[in-house]
Image (tube, rainbow, N blue to C red):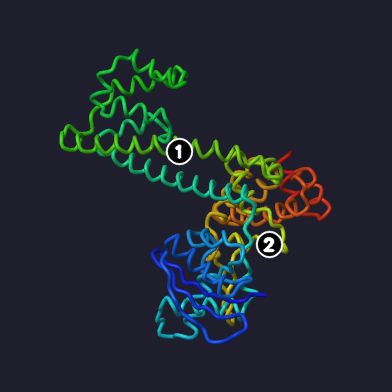
Amino acid sequence: MFTAQVGLDWADAKHDFCLQPGGGGSREFGRFLHQPDQIDAWAQGLKARFGGMIAVAMELTQGPIVYALQKYDFIVLFPVDPSLLAKYRVAFKPSRAKDDPTDAELALELMLRYPEHCPPLHPQSVAMRTLSYLVQQRRMLVDDRKRTVNRLCYALKQYFPQALDWFDHRDTPLFCDFLTRWPTLQQVKRARAATLESFFHDHNVRREPLVARRVEGIKSAIPLTEDVAVIQSFQLLATTLVDQLRTLLRAIARFDEEIALVTPKLPDYKLFSALPGSGPTLAPRLLTAFGEQRERFQNAGQVQRYSGVAPVTQRSGKKSWVHWRWQCPTFVRQTFVEWAAQTINKSFWAGTFYQQQRAKGSPHQVAVRALAFKWIRILYRCWMTHTPYDESRYLKALQLRGSPLLAGLATKTA
């Protein structure tokens, strides 16, 4: 069905390709720069020369070159697993020699010889892809926020550690405003008690015992150091990090607003928003983890393996080794595991299952992954049948199967 097949080895500044006409013949090698006009000239040249549909294999499912080629309706992209290509290269080159044109030819070989391992890329709807990018980018900002808070805590420990004792949550506008107004202990100690109380009241901190404890702590605090070099340098670092943290907090809030606008437009949103512990953050992530193309997964096991929640068992002779899956979309695995942890105290059977795993000696993370593994089977069924999750209905199903979870549930209820 393709008039030509192309293997593409992408890079930041240029792309090498290996081309084979659809009817066979000798292969051609070439290169074009990663510039919009160069990419367009290359694609239009293929269309003018071969016409019809053209298959392009590459080691990407998203990225600038993917976005550039997706706008051409005569190009079909075939993503190749990078680890599969690496193993394929080593199979024929034990020396592990690597070259971009060779990788382009190997991508072409994999697409031609093993099409079952290189399915074509079918983009989802604009709304779904937009939400997918938004939730991933939001997570990147959340990670940046965590790193910034850790660096800020490090800076404060050098000259102003009392601020960390007065505030349990350091990623809030309250903490940022406090350090912006009083970046050192000497400055905050000069503030009047009424000024401090007014500051906390303006930030909706109205529990009088908490306010009084903070004011008393400020007045009785003793400086950690009086070294001007330490205080001056780390004060500048702390205030700079506070500015960065404040920017990240505003950016995350803007992403939350945009996600809240996009998510309700998707038809499957109600399936995931009603789940226990999903909320406005995890429900969109669960929605994008499954997507809207139900033909992608034939059973729940494929979702478990794709997400990396399913463990891997290796056997050789009398030896057996079980480990977690290394090659998987990390963000998807984080989504399932983080959501499963939220269901422990919001779902009767989930909490009981988690406690049973801990009683067996499993660490917290292992128990949560086991719970996520079990949840995926339930979510897959709900997703495929367009049926919202019903806790009572699932408990009845457990009763019919005689599940050992019911004994734990009965004990918990009693």
**Foreground residue, 338 or 246?**
246
Residue 268 position, x and y percent, is 70, 46
Classed neighbour count for the residue bearing mark 2: other residues with Cα under 10 Å, few (<14), some (14–19), many (≥20): few
Q: Residue 173: name its quadrant.
A: top left
Compared with 171, 12 (above or below) is below
- The kind of secondary structure element at disc 2 is helix
Q: What's the amino acid at mark 1?
A: Ala
Q: What's the amino acid at mark 2?
A: Arg
Residue 158 position, x and y percent, is 25, 39
Residue 182 position, x and y percent, is 29, 25
Question: In this view, which residue lies farthest toward the top?
Answer: 194
Is residue 361 toward the left or the right of residue 267 in the image?
left
Q: CA distance from mark 1 to mark 2?
A: 33 Å
Is residue 128 toward the left or the right of residue 147 in the image?
right
The disc, 1 or 2, on the residue closer to the chain's N-terminal end is 1
Q: Which residue is mark 1?
A: 251
Q: Residue 228: name its quadrant.
A: top left
Residue 203 position, x and y percent, is 44, 22
Q: Quadrant of the C terminus?
A: top right
**Foreground residue, 325 or 98?**
98
Q: Which residue is mark 2?
A: 296
Residue at image coords 54%, 72%: 46
